[in-house]
């Protein structure tokens, strides 16, 4: 499959530290790939290298099979949505959104029509003349997105675009973004440190660690078969038992705590997040195990239980380097 | 276009950078070199005139005393304006600046009118005028710092059990210390190189290095002594300026600054009385000298339109020359200072910043003196050229332009340029579309201040202004030097005109600067 974006062997050293240590990545035409990693893993550097804002020390970036080497940022046809929006404070909403079109010398009438269309797309109809300093956080995001999409970039890059938003707004925008990318068939690379966000937005999730991509998979595959113990812990799988060079990973939804006075474990306090309850139990030998399930019946803390595990939900993975 | 394009931009940038360099080389470095050549003896020593030690001593202690008094007078005002929210606060902030932009000649004239006869000339008059000028420096710098010291850290200290004195000593003072030392250093620098005030209010025998350069060069025609004193002054100023910029740089990074909105509190109870009292006293001290000046000028206004033996032109014409010269000077200062600021802003703050500010401290008198001994022979005989005046004034004003524009340029979020680039803007286009609009306000402010400074410039202008094209400060000085109520009245009237134009220009600039985020 010829990917719209191809990154091969990308290396960048920043201040003696290897920010990108040989990255290979493909994003297929019209799909969204989420790059997921902790801060300092090199995901922003990767994005900036693709955008042309950071020079690669080695490796190549190609878009539609054409190498972007030596092409300056303003000629790459790559859109970038910044973490803190980077809206032009001296221009109104329409001028921000229309900036890229103006750079392409699009005629005024056409430009205005396109700005209207994009504002409608992001749900900001009629706000053309608003000053960006008067916008709410969510509105700013929408303007930033419309601005990045306006020149119809071949590839849209998003650098933690929803950081620093309150949770309900964040969750709503994640859903909107995914729907919008599907609707317009946008090829996109989405960088985030938030697992839920990556899973929600990306058809594929690329997990990054220390300047390398350690796994690329669909969210389901990632959850079912993380590449190693570090990836498992990073994406939120807490039941990781290391045994030398390998580790056993047990998905929490396949763990059931059955109340039993003769059980070998005791449950702790449950934690509810929406429909999902996470329960932690401690075996008499001190090991801990986490169970996740939906439902309203929480055993009171201290209840003795037997732990039942669906063997199909246990995978053996390499222990990997310590994180 | 690719690489060829960027090479072109770099070439253009380089060419752009040479404009201020060439300008400074011809009109700053070259006169300076002439002074060095004249002032240094063959064996490289300085042959300073007799009495130099006393001169330096007086220069130093009057500056130190002025600085101390300015701090005492300025701190309450800094506290009131920096700490509290009240109706008319931004107006008060703007008005505090008025004395600072008033031409020295105007302030000196006003104090002559204000002070009783036995105090008119001498040290008390000098100190009073210096305090009047520099209270603005202390208020703006310290008040600005105060306004961004997070009140919540004081509140946190209070909750943790620190009493008011303890809080002041352990929380507030350490945060203000950099601003205090920076304001002191700047005030000291201004008082150390003060010229018009000393010349007019000093009285006979009272001289600082600055006024003595003028005295030797323009009255005694002892050019060698004037050159030697200029070199001495340059060295002294370099030392003071270095200390000042080090202190100022430290003031700049005083940790994370809070948003003003989180900090300002409404004064309550006793503080309310204190704030009101401080503002009232400040208002009286600000208005009184100017009111007396205006009062004195009444009845003399018709003299502005009569011929006078003091000048080759009618007095009102000095205003026309002043405005014309100052406009040209402001334009030059904007171009030269603006380009210098763009060059400076590309690199992190550092040594170069202080270097650019050298003309600011390098005394104006030295500049004027350098001009007359440098541009007096072919092919650089510019003595009869009118433009020598605006060029000299622009050298005094340009550092202020750099000081205002550079931080504005540096404060532009680099991500805005990156955003422009990813949207298809070339580097040049991005500068035009992003940088320029964002600093246009700073340029407006800089233009206003450059104009105001050029308008009031006296130390350099007094050397290079031609008798048939006097500027207002020079004309005022001529009238003050003549006996008779008519001359004094004319001086007062001219001073009112000069003050009026200057204050209007500065307030217009200040309003422009304050307009950010307030209605549109």
Image: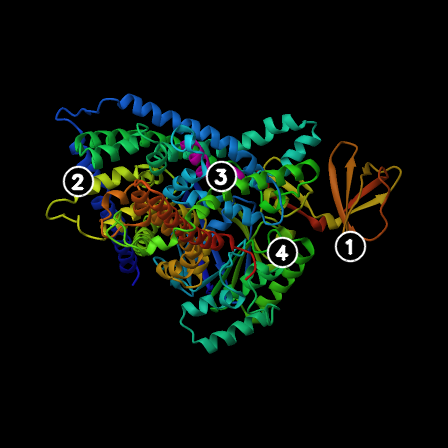
Residue B373 numbered mark, or none: 2
Q: Is residue B138 located in the magenta-colored stretch of the structure?
A: yes
| Residue A67 at x, y percent in the picture | 37, 61
Dots 2, 4 in contact, CB < 8 A: no
Circle 3 residue:
B141
Residue A199 numbered mark, or none: 4
The residue marked by circle 2 belongs to what chain?
B
Which one is in front in this view, the residue at disc 3 or the one at disc 4? 3
Task: Magenta stretch: give its range.
Answer: B125-143
Label 1 to label 4: alpha-carbon separation? 18 Å
Q: Residues within 10 Å of mark 3 (few under 14, many from 20)?
A: many
Query: Up-down: is A139 above or below A55?
Result: below
Helix, strand or loop for the magenta stretch, by majority:
helix
Label 3 to label 2: alpha-carbon separation? 38 Å
| Residue A76 at x, y percent in the picture | 40, 62
Dots 3, 4 in contact, CB < 8 A: no
Circle 1 residue:
A275
């Amino acid at each position: 499959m010829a990917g719209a974006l191809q990154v091969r062997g990308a290396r960048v050293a920043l201040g003696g530290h290897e920010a990108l240590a040989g990255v290979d990545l493909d994003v297929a035409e019209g799909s969204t790939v989420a790059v997921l990693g902790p801060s300092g893993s090199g995901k922003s550097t990767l994005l900036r290298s693709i955008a042309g804002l950071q020079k690669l020390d080695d490796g190549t970036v190609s878009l539609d099979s054409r190498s972007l080497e030596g092409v300056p940022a303003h000629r790459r046809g790559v859109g970038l949505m910044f973490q803190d929006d980077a809206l032009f404070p001296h221009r109104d909403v329409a001028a921000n959104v229309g900036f890229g079109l103006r750079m392409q010398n699009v005629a005024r009438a056409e430009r205005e029509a396109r700005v209207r269309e994009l504002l409608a797309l992001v749900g900001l109809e009629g706000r053309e003349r608003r000053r960006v300093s008067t916008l709410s956080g969510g509105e700013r995001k929408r303007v930033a997105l419309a601005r990045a999409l306006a020149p119809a970039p071949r590839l849209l890059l998003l650098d933690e675009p929803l950081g620093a938003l309150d949770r309900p707004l964040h969750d709503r925008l994640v859903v909107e973004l995914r729907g919008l990318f599907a609707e317009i068939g946008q090829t996109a690379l989405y960088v985030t440190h938030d697992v839920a966000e990556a899973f929600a937005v990306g058809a594929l999730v690329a997990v990054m660690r220390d300047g390398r991509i350690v796994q690329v998979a669909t969210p389901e595959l990632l959850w079912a078969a993380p590449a190693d113990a570090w990836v498992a812990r990073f994406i939120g799988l807490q039941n990781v038992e290391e045994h030398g060079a390998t580790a056993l990973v047990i998905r929490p939804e396949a763990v059931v705590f059955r109340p039993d006075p003769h059980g070998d474990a005791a449950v702790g306090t449950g934690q509810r997040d929406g429909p999902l309850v996470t329960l932690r139990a401690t075996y008499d030998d001190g090991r801990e195990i986490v169970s996740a399930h939906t439902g309203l019946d929480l055993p009171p803390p201290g209840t003795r239980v037997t732990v039942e595990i669906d063997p199909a939900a246990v995978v053996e993975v390499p222990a990997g380097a310590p994180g | 276009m690719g690489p060829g394009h960027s090479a072109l931009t770099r070439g253009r940038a380089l060419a752009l950078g040479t404009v201020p360099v060439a300008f400074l080389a011809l009109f700053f470095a070259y006169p300076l070199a002439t002074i060095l050549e004249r002032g240094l003896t063959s064996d490289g020593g300085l042959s300073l005139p007799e009495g130099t030690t006393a001169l330096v001593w007086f220069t130093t202690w009057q500056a130190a005393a002025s600085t101390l008094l300015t701090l005492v007078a300025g701190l309450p005002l800094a506290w009131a304006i920096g700490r509290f929210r009240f109706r008319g606060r931004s107006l008060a902030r703007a008005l505090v600046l008025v004395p600072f932009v008033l031409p020295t000649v105007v302030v000196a004239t006003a104090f002559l009118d204000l002070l009783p006869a036995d105090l008119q000339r001498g040290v008390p008059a000098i100190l009073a005028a210096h305090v009047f000028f520099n209270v603005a420096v202390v208020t703006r710098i310290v008040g600005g710092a105060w306004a961004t010291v997070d009140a919540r850290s004081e509140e946190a200290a209070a909750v943790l059990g620190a009493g008011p004195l303890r809080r002041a000593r352990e929380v507030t003072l350490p945060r203000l210390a950099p601003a205090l030392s920076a304001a002191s250093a700047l005030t000291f620098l201004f008082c150390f190189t003060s010229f018009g005030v000393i010349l007019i209010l000093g009285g006979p025998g009272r001289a600082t290095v600055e006024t003595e350069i003028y005295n030797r060069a323009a009255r005694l025609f002892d050019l060698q002594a004037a050159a030697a004193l200029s070199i001495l002054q340059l060295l002294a100023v370099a030392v003071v300026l270095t200390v000042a910029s080090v202190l100022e740089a430290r003031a700049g990074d005083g940790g994370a600054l809070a948003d003003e909105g989180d900090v300002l509190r409404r004064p309550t109870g006793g503080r309310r009385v204190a704030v009101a009292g401080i503002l009232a006293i400040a208002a009286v001290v600000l208005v009184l000298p100017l009111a007396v000046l205006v009062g004195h000028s009444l009845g003399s206004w018709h003299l502005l339109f009569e011929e006078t033996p003091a000048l080759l032109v009618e007095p009102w014409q000095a205003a026309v020359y002043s405005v014309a010269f100052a406009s040209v000077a402001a334009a030059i200062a904007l171009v030269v200072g603006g380009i210098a600021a763009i060059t400076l802003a590309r690199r992190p703050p550092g040594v170069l910043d202080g270097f650019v500010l050298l003309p600011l401290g390098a005394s104006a008198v030295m500049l004027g003196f350098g001009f007359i001994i440098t541009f007096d022979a072919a092919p650089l005989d510019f003595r009869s050229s009118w433009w020598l005046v605006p060029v000299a004034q622009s050298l005094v004003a340009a550092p202020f332009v750099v000081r205002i524009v550079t931080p504005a340029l540096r404060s532009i979020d680099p991500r805005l340029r990156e955003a422009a680039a990813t949207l298809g803007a070339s580097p040049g286009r991005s500068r035009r579309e992003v940088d320029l609009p964002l600093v246009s306000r700073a340029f407006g402010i800089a233009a206003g201040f450059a104009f105001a400074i050029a308008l009031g410039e006296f130390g350099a202008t007094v050397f290079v202004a031609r008798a048939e094209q006097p500027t207002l400060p020079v004309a005022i000085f001529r009238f003050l030097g003549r006996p008779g109520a008519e001359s004094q009245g004319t001086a007062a009237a001219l001073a009112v005109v000069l003050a009026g134009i200057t204050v209007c220009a500065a307030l217009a600039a200040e309003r422009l600067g304050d307009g950010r985020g307030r209605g549109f």
